[in-house]
Image (cartoon, rainbow, N blue to C red):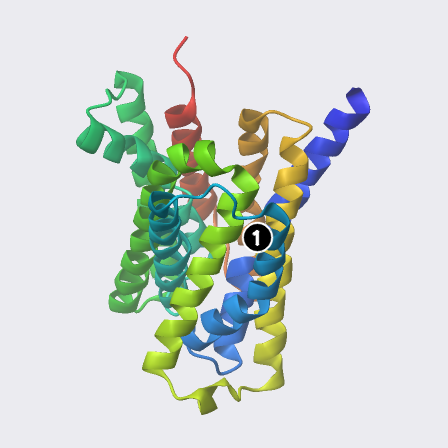
Amino acid sequence: MAQARTLGLLLAGLSAVAFSFKAVFVKLGLAHGADALTLLALRMGFALPVFLFMAWRSGAGGLTRRDWLWLAALGAVGYYLSSLFDFLGLQYISVGLERMILFTYPTLVALFSALFFGHAIRPAAWGALALSYIGIGLAVSHDLAFAGASRELIAGSLWVFASAVSYALFWMGSGHVVMRVGATRMTAFVSIFACLFVLGHFAIAHPLASLAAPMPVYIDALALALLCTVLPIWLQAGALRRIDAPTAALIGTLGPVITILLGWWILGEAMSLTQFAGLSLVVAGVLLVGAKPT
């Protein structure tokens, strides 16, 4: 039992590390000459065979027309729009700020649940929400101090915030779907729909010849597909078979820290005490929003 838990903790940690590389490889792909949509299309194209295999193993038996519509909608909102907005935002802001803004999606889930479904927000949770957004403000001030270009910084932050909103809507809609179709099958089919939406968007917006990118772009896209998309999903699934979801989520809070360190190590992005103070507030706020009342 102890060995299984230790392995589960290790898998959850490795999943957080693998996912933390995503923004770094996006930045590298953009620096190597790809635009956001082309890089996203390559990522989804490389990942699509894996998701098709997952869907084949899971099967489609018993899925109703309503299920298919929900799976398509979740693919559009959760993995297509969320990824597209995120890639667009990373053209303008640091990977550390991007990760912190994305990390606030649980606070958005709490707010949307209150707005749309009348769920009460505990008084303590309002303070947690304030902590998260004060932390984002500190992170933005860090980027302004080191990078400047406030108009681009605001544009990038808004794109990534739109990504967080899309991801929050995905989580709100996925609860009853996963109960009906199962986690693995939902992930497979939602991801397939997202891949098709991205590739369709690319086919409309760009000529096919634009896929003739420099070799480093293909390497970045392949890393995004396998290291930062497929591998974290597989590791997280393995972790959840051995540890409970709250513990796995707690380990996931390491993600923003790892991303900031990777941005400094690989991309040469600046770090400061202001940035880590903002990160601490964001993480504290997210943990408090997710905490169960005693």
Q: Nearer the viewer, residue 22 or 77?
A: 77
Quarter where residue 92 is shown: bottom left
Q: As drawn, which residue projects farthest toward the bottom?
A: 209
Q: Quadrant of the C terminus?
A: top left
Amino acid type, label 1: Ala
Disc 1, SS = helix
Please identify the residue farthest to the top as the structure is shown. Answer: 294
Whole-percent x, y for residue 78 in the image: 38, 51
Residue at 70% across, 32% down: 8
Name the residue rendered at 39%, 88% in the picture: 207
User: How many numbered tags mark residues here?
Assistant: 1
- Residue named by callout 1: 55
For the question of whether residue 271 can be seen, the reply is yes
- Would you call the spot at circle 1 few (<14 residues within 10 Å), some (14-19), or many (20 or more)? many
In the depicted structure, whether residue 91 falls above or below residue 96:
below
Q: What percent of the width, then of the height, locates residue 134?
A: 30, 39
Q: Quadrant of residue 24?
A: bottom right
Please tell me whether residue 207 is drawn above or below residue 189 in the rendered image. Answer: below
Question: Along the horizontal axis of the image, is 189 left or right of 204?
Answer: right
Which residue is situated farthest in the right direction here?
Answer: 3
